[in-house]
Amino acid sequence: MTYREHCKKWKNCQLCELCQTRKHVVLARGTVPCDVLFVGEAPGQSEDVLGRPFVGPAGKLLDRLIARTLDGQYDYCLTNVVACIPIDAEAGGKAGEPSRASIKACAPRLQEMIELARPRLIVRVGKLATKYVITSIPTVDITHPAAILRMDVTQQGLAYQRCYVAIEDALEELEEG
């Protein structure tokens, strides 16, 4: 299967309840195949509108982190555990955490994406990705940029630096191994 076929296959997915409130299925952004695959949690409102992952404020922070750590030396791609925005009706229609049923329904899409990307390293972005992205490919876990942006300003720099160091260390291990 090609990446184009993957996109065609999943662009109108109806496998879970998230299809009822989304504007777009948000599949990936970047190069396929890639050296480093970043897997986040779920699209937010900006991503749902534009149909691309990590394009809102958290995405801009992640883009800066990627530019700094990968320094143009590695191809990368960004995707999420689920491809549709999980709307939380109890939170006034804002993005929430996807249900286990949605995560399970989207697992074949994510697995297919990992197989197409053939990454040497997977960066699990946030707690949900850490919990649900289980693979034999080397992984590193970082704090989700949205969580960093919600931190007190005095903590943001430290959290960002921890993410930077974690990715740098993982890349060094790849090159040494």
Image (spheres, grey):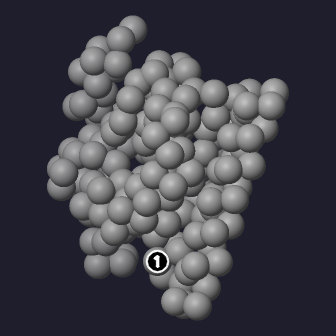
Q: Are there few (<14), some (14-19), or many (20+) residues within 10 Å of tag 1? A: some
The residue sitting at the right extreme is 177
* Whether residue 86 is visible: no
Query: What quarter of the picture does the N terminus occupy?
Result: top left
Residue 87, given in percent of the width and then of the height, sits at: 33, 63
Residue 69, given in percent of the width and then of the height, sits at: 56, 51
The residue sitting at the top extreme is 1
Q: Residue 126 occupies which quadrant of the picture?
A: bottom right
Amino acid beneath label 1:
Leu
Q: Residue 80 occupies which quadrant of the picture?
A: top left
Residue 6, given in percent of the width and then of the height, sits at: 34, 20
Query: What quarter of the picture does the C terminus occupy?
Result: top right
Q: Which residue is mark 1?
A: 149
Give me the residue at 46% from left, 70% from top: 146
Q: Residue 170 occupies which quadrant of the picture?
A: top right
Q: In this rendering, would 96 be left or right of 152?
A: left
Give me the residue at 35% from left, 12% from top: 2
Q: In this rendering, would 151 be left or right of 79?
A: right
* Above-or-below relation of 28 to 96: above
* Whether residue 61 is visible: yes
Give me the residue at 46% from left, 40% from top: 72
- Element assignment for label 1: helix
Nearest the eye: 153 or 69: 69
Residue 150, given in percent of the width and then of the height, sits at: 48, 81
